[in-house]
Amino acid sequence: MSIVPLHIPINEIDRYFYNRTEDIKKIEYYLNSLEIGISQSLLIRGVRGVGKTFLLQKLKQDSKKNFLVSYIDISRIVGIDDTQLTAQSVLLELLDEMNNTIYDKIHDSKKVTFLLKKLIDKLKIKDFSFSKGIHMAEIPIPATEDNYKKISKFVMEYPQNVVESIDGIDGFIIIIDEFQMLKKLKNPESFFWLMRSYSQFQSNVSYVMSGSISQTSDAIEMLNGATGAFGGRMMQINIDPFTKHETKSYFNDRFPEIKFTDDGFNRFYEYTKGIPMYINSFYNALSSHETYDEKSIDYIFLNNMDQILVMWIRIWGTLNKYEKKIICAMLNKENISWSKLERSLDMSPATLTKYIKTLQDKGIIKYHDGNYNFEDLMLKTWLNNEKERTGVYPQ
């Protein structure tokens, strides 16, 4: 048996990618309309660990030759820059990635450099600060504080101008992963409206926004709600976990050496819920020398919980004390209202509201019919197990 990596290297996509045929067909159906000058913007969501990023990388890799596809991960920008996330830093990262995409697609560097110089000449800026900027085709692009309007206009118009300037290119697809982290901007609503104000007049540019985020998060309302920037015009696509049948087919195809009894497989599916991250991490704890029944699956799960739920252990370590207090107050309760949470916590209403929203943005809790609950019960399972094992919840 080999170990399945939980985070797949980009150059190993085809080796580990499985199924998702219908999801890809659905997404490509909307994006292919760029060929006839109709742009569709998409909002892709799903529970954490379901494989959204992997799917988006597969789409980028297999995109048509007449499409340019750029991918940026907002969490990466946040991680690199430990200061306040700014709209300008996001725009410059996007500009850099679009440039890389053009170079990867068009191997004639002289042609690319000429094209970029021609487009950049349209950007007239007085206050240059090359030390903070980026380079495109060995041309420095300045980072400016006083000319955000010009920078934003240039970047937003850039993909459509590129399509119109390059023969054989019919569309530019821009994938923005972990988009909910744009809420860290000083004015995220303004940024979403900026995107909308330009995209509505571009016939060859499609935006694909993706994130592990609760359906009830106000980030979705800001972006695509009735009063949001896109006003429901973004096509929303949910990436679902594998069904029980798909999970069984996945094992038969990729891990035929693993044997289950019927009740053993049913229990395995109860634990993993068809989420690929859980399936693969659970597989790494199994052996090819045993046939697993219900009891043995229970044993493996309870004795390898830290390995199987490593995703949540990492996430728990990133939460602040307020977020952890809210989560612990929700444990062992099916549903809990805001007022009950307030009564059970030594926290001001404003602080409680703020961190409930951040937990929704992170896809950890959800809101339904006036109550809050966990988006994924595996976090709850791990925390309760730690409390039973050590006597306290992890810090």
Image: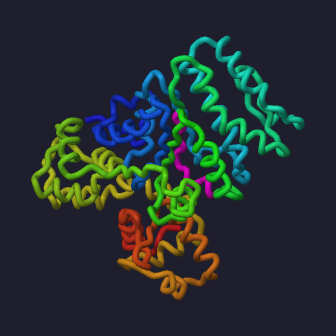
Q: Position of residue 57 (x, y in %)?
A: 45, 35
Residue under the image location 50 percent in, 39 percent down: 39
Q: Is residue 139 left or right of residue 47?
A: right
Residue 151 sits in which quadrant?
Answer: top right
Q: Position of residue 386 (x, y in %)?
A: 41, 68
Q: Position of residue 124 (x, y in %)?
A: 83, 32
Out of 232 and 70, give the one closest to the viewer. 232
Residue under the image location 43 percent in, 25 percent down: 64
Q: Position of residue 142 (x, y in %)?
A: 80, 34
Q: Is residue 82 above or below residue 32?
A: below
- The structure's colour scheme is rainbow
Residue under the image location 52 percent in, 75 percent down: 326
Residue 379 sits in which quadrant?
Answer: bottom left
Out of 56 and 301, give the one closest to the viewer. 56
* Residue 269 makes an appearance in the image: yes
Q: Residue furthest left?
A: 262
Residue 293 sits in which quadrant?
Answer: bottom left
Q: Is residue 214 above or below residue 166?
A: below
Q: Which residues are magenta?
A: 173-183
Residue under the image location 49 percent in, 68 percent down: 394
Assign the N terminus to one quadrant of the image. Answer: top left
Q: Give the number of callouts.
A: 0
Q: Is residue 58 left or right of residue 233?
A: left
Queried whether the magenta region covers residue 124, the answer comes back as: no
Q: Is residue 284 left or right of residue 298?
A: right
* Residue 9 makes an appearance in the image: no
Queried whether the magenta region covers residue 179, the answer comes back as: yes
Q: Residue furthest right?
A: 126
